[in-house]
Image: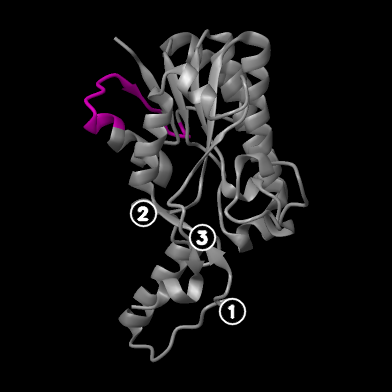
Amino acid sequence: MMSTYVAGHRGMVGSAMLRRLEALGQRHIVTRTHGELDLSRQAEVEAFFREERVDRVYMAAARVGGIHANNTYPAEFIYENFMMECNMIHGAYKAGVQKHLFLGSSCIYPRLAEQPMREDALLYGVLEPTNEPYAIAKIAGIKLCESYNRQYGRDYRSIMPTNLYGPNDNFHPENSHVVPALLRRFHEAVQSGAEEVVIWGSGTPMREFLHVDDMAAAAVHVMELPEEVYRAHTRPMLSHINVGTGKDCTIANWLKP
């Protein structure tokens, strides 16, 4: 029976993956909490792969946050994501895992990338300074998958989702992304009877939003594609696929009823 490991199953993305796989009837799904398995520790990760002998990995675990969190904790964002990616991809390789899906972020693209962003824009310009450490870590994850495919013949794939929202999101007042941050402010305003809600920024930045359950469906679809079909959408043995709606809007317009 095929065994699948979903890393980060209690987060927004990982829990959506879990729901999708269960809805498709997959029975043998392996999960671990951070207390049970620290992905930043190489010995623990390699011991896990030796013991569980999983066939596939969905790498949804990551240190994530909004602009404030990225600005405040840049060292933690780059270090923790580097360590988790290296340990997971190399550990999967050592254990003989042939299929692995890595999830990145649209912040990997240059700050002034042409819109809509194409996969081949990667590394063709300066990154957004506010989340550059996180973006560098995610680019490294893509390149790790590419390199293990090239050298070891693995089928390690990468997808880059657009801005996600949905159940189990992070609603921290300072460290969350734009959608949960706004939802929290509106909720607290209603609870307190406030007459106005203060929102950071001008509302003019363009964003493309995607519900996390739709992203999970796309991720499983990409994982299940025959290898030759997946490679037809990427460079030979390399690269990644964007996942989004293809439609963007300003924050201000998104807020309009």
Asked where in the image residue 234 lies, by quadrant, the reply is: top right
The answer to whether residue 102 is above or below residue 70 is above
Residue at screen point 60% across, 50% down: 117
Residue at screen point 58% across, 17% down: 91
Give the residue at mark 3. 177
Q: Earlier in the sequence, mark 1 or mark 3?
A: 3
Residue 8 screen position, x and y as percent: 45, 36
Give the residue at mark 1. 202
Q: Nearer the viewer, residue 155 or 18?
A: 155
Q: Nearer the viewer, mark 1 or mark 3?
A: 1
Give the residue at mark 2. 166
Q: Nearer the viewer, residue 235 or 24?
A: 235
The magenta stretch is 21-35
Q: Nearer the viewer, residue 72 or 231?
A: 231
Q: Secondary structure at mark 2?
A: loop
Residue 68 screen position, x and y as percent: 62, 63
Q: Is residue 78 visible?
A: no
Q: Earlier in the sequence, mark 1 or mark 2?
A: 2
Residue 155 screen position, x and y as percent: 53, 17
